[in-house]
Amino acid sequence: MADSRPSTPNEGNSVKVVVRVRKFLQRELDRSAPCIVEMNPVSQQTILHPPPLTPAEAKASRKIYEEKSFTFDKSFWSHDIDTPHYAHQKDVYASFGEDFLDHNFDGYHTCIFAYGQTGSGKSYTMMGTPEQPGLIPRTCEGLFERINEEQNSSITYNVHVSYFEVYNEHVRDLLVARTNPPSYLKIRESKADGVYVQGLTDSPVKSYAEVEKLMKAGDQNRTTASTKMNDTSSRSHAVFTLTLKQIQHDIATDSTIERLARMRLVDLAGSERANRTEATGARLREGSNINQSLTTLGRVIAALADPKRQRALQQRGPANQTKRRMDVVPYRDSVLTWLLKDSLGGNSKTAMVACISPTDYEETLSTLRYADQAKKIQTRAHVNQDAVSAAERDAKILEMQDTIRNLQLCMNNAATRKRDEADRATEELETYQREVIKMQRAMEESKVVSDVKIRTLTQELDEWKPLAISLQTEVESLRRHLALALGELKNPIVIPKNTEEKENYYATDDDTDCATEYASDEDDGYESAPADWQMDVDELMKELGMFKRRVADDHVRFGAGQPDGGLQAH
């Protein structure tokens, strides 16, 4: 397989960071809480004002509250709907969601994740409501709108959906019904597939309606609970993934171009403090695990945003980094950061939506600081595209079949192995199953390519049929002319000799001499005429034979077979 990606990676792309402030909650209205956040729609500056405190409150808190200012790629004011620069759900999607969808069709991996404290509007921004859909449903709907608008019949689109949550440092498939006890999935990492969830449901979809159905089923299975800070608090990190595969076949060269893009849309659980949520028991343990994963995420962001590391990447490139340098990024300290490894610092175009509260100074400042660090991260996204010829495609299928046979042999021999090798045999079985799925998809894609070729050749045959009919008509006309010429040759018109003798008898001597000379010349012409005709007929027969062969070749070429009333040898 010839990889058509550039030989050198693209220059680093900074993580796109936007911030969004929500409206007041009812409990904030009940206590007449002031809004301490200000946003400038022109400079995209977000200003955090210190909360108004009485001298007694300031003395009791023993903390210094200062005005803080941050600048991001976009600041969405969703606090007061009466203001002219109020940001609706559609405004958030139009700001960068459409651009990220463009990146997916160009063959880039993308990731959008929402970060913030509990109750700051993350789930509303990502999922929304039926009346105000968020980024995830709008992205899915926009994806299928573009596919349906595509006019190029040589491009085939395959879309797959997966949906899982990270709950208490365990991964659970949200597209599978809940079980008791819960069934958790394992995380694996390979050179070919990177970090992936073993056994995760990957459902093919053909329309937005199918995606919406899976999305609703996953949301119902997601773990939520009521806390003092949020009545419907998400107790897990949810990762919704769309995989887009574009297959374009060139009928002229019989080659295939494949583009693969992965869209990860992540709704993180909110950070929370136990003394403020008043959580106990299971809720307290959930909050502790949530904070642990978010703390690790913050450490990963800080490591990736380290200026020393950025300079090292620019000078030496990611392939030449020392192991010590790469181990500084603690991806494996949390399940969440391990799964988002490529999205945070690898082959992906990434955006972060920082959702903040309009009243909580400390939590809002913490979120803004994380967001300010995240915008310093550089990712190195490249187009995931392969150009495959027909021979390479067939060779790939044969290679997969050989791999499957070898894995089957390994599995047949696994029964005789020692008990401590059982885990490795299980992994080989999973690899075998993935290879089977890949081969099935490759065969389906090969069938699609064959269908395109058949449609193209059928169209060409339909275009050539009128010409074949016209050529057949000309052949019939030439046959009739040839028959007439042969008839005249076999039955020439002969002048009777008696008439000539009578005319010569009454002629004078001079006339007789002239007549004799004339008759002699005429006889010579008459005798030579059949020979000339015979030569003409021979040449005509040769040309007719060549023409018949051309017509026969055309019939064979266009698959028309022997036409009705076809030429027969005479």
Image (spheres, helix red, strand yellow):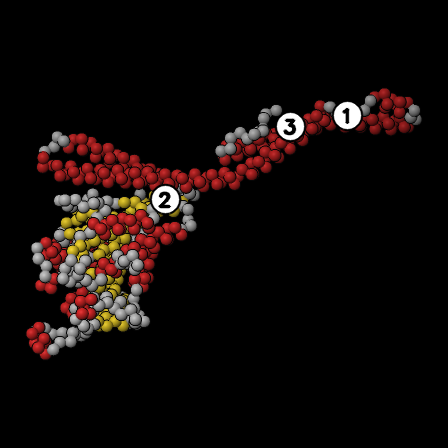
What residue do we see at 34% from left, 48% from top?
Answer: 207
> Is residue 445 or residue 280 the one in the foreground?
280
What residue do we see at 31% from left, 43% from top?
Answer: 1
Residue topped by disc 1: 493
Circle 3: element type: helix
Quadrant of the snapshot with the C terminus: top right
The Cα–Cα distance between marks 3 and 2, rounded to whole angstroms, is 53 Å
Q: Position of residue 282 (x, y in %)?
A: 10, 54
Circle 2: element type: strand
Is residue 322 among the parts visible in the rendering? no
Residue topped by disc 2: 256
Q: Label 2 near label 3: C-beta < 8 Å?
A: no
Residue 538: image tag? 3
The Cα–Cα distance between marks 3 and 1, rounded to whole angstroms, is 21 Å
Q: Give the number of the mark in front: 1 or 2.
A: 2
Mark 1 closeness class: few <14, some 14–19, many ≥20 residues within 10 Å: few
Question: Which amino acid is tagged 3?
Answer: Asp
Q: Is residue 54 above or below residue 121?
A: below
On screen, residue 206 versus residue 496, left or right, reads: left
